[in-house]
Image: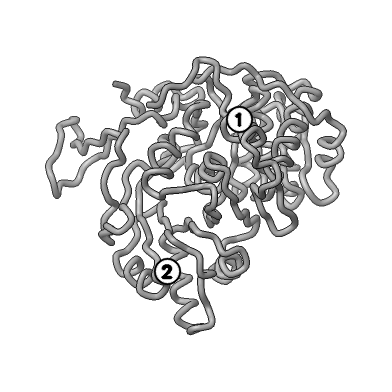
Amino acid sequence: MSDYPRQYNAAADMVDRHGVEGRSDKTAFIDPARSMTYGELVTETNQAANLMAALGIRREERVACVLLDTCDYPAIFWGAIKAGVVPIALNTLLTTEQYRYILEDSRARAVFVSAPLLPVVEPILEGLPFLNHVIVVGGDGGYAAQRDAQPETFALADTVADEVAFWLYSSGSTGMPKGTKHLHTSPMETCRLYAKPVLGIGEDDVFFSAAKLFFAYGLGNGMSFPLSVGATAVLWPERPTPQAMFRQLQQHRPTLYFGVPTLYAGMLALAQSEGADIDTGGRLRLCVSAGEALPEEVGKAWEKRFGVEILDGIGSTEMLHIFLSNRANAVRYGTSGQPLPGYDLRLVDDDGTELGDGAIGELLVRGPTAAEGYWNQREKTRRTFAGE
């Protein structure tokens, strides 16, 4: 793991540094309604942090983000981190009862909710004992006015490198979702260990992720990675249909595209039906796939049709991003690649005995991006996070 000072706030690296390094006028994020420069990101994160202080939300308390992928998302997320408040990125496709469970479980003091999502959340808001504030973002909601009333400067909370910065909720495949606690150092570590050496990211890249920001995969693709190098990210708040993805690729001409196997397959099918009229914008240099195994035939067909490799990899909510990946110019479709330097991987049986090549077992991974554990889930934490 890289050396971080004990006093470290992730927003200093991911947001404020870019003003100091002369990127204030450079575009940080683009959504269908507007674009946001790095200077505007600094200002809006400061205002969001001031708003949370004005609402009485204290350091280490949680705020829930039920937000579509727009420029407001990074401003609110990193504004919370600036204040030492812990943002929780929540899936926007949950049911009302799932939101009830998570808001009760997390004891969130406030929820920032995109206006189109309010009808799903609104029925439960009155009955949550810890929830004090509901801030509606977009539409006729009050967030913009509340934000703009706040000062444009803010002194970063003096957080510790090993302090919890944000939560993600696991998918709940074995029960209800679990609050997964990630540290201030983890976003930059995913960039250091994966995005920079494997993808070769730089300031001139334009990122576009079909996976939403509430996923660990999408959070890295659409926020941590571009912010780590001062690049630009395209945000898409609607469903990532094949038609919509091609439109965004052609309009914004990204250099890096992040999808999932079913979407790549759907895009290939659409391209086959549309013929030569459909393309990826002409600037793509790499694509990435995660979330499930990429079928060999899909990877090969994509590269043949568009001339761009797809790097398949494996990651998890608990590890924050990809730790096992194919490499550019050495892709073996039908495989998940090799471990990233900085991560230790072992394949074991039910008794913990290490297995050889070709065996089927449980994959254990150790690395600096591992979450601190699950919120109020001691036994599940002990079973999932085995320690050193």
- Find disc 2 in the rendering and name its residue: 265
| Amino acid of disc 1 | Ala
Q: How many marks?
A: 2
Q: Is residue 61 placed above or below 134 in the rendered structure?
A: above
Q: Residue at x 82, y 42 (%)?
A: 144
Determine crowd level at label 1: few under 14, some 14-19, many 20+ residues with C-alpha closer than 10 A. Answer: many
Residue 206: % across, % down: 55, 55
* Element type at mark 1: helix
The x and y percentages for residue 4 are 47, 21
Q: Quadrant of residue 189?
A: top left
Q: Nearer the viewer, mark 1 or mark 2?
A: 1
Q: x, y (%) of residue 240?
A: 57, 62
Q: Residue at x 63, y 57 (%)?
A: 236
User: Does residue 322 appear in this view?
Assistant: yes
Q: Tell me the kind of residue under disc 2.
A: Ala
Quarter the C terminus occupies: top left
What residue lies at 74% left-to-right and 30% top-to-bottom?
46
Q: For numbered disc 2, what is the local secondary structure?
A: helix
Residue at 32% over, 33% down: 342
How crowded pointer 2 is (Cα within 10 Å; few <14, some 14-19, many 20+) is rated as some
Verify CB contact (< 8 Å) between mark 1 and mark 2: no
Q: Which residue is under mark 1?
A: 11
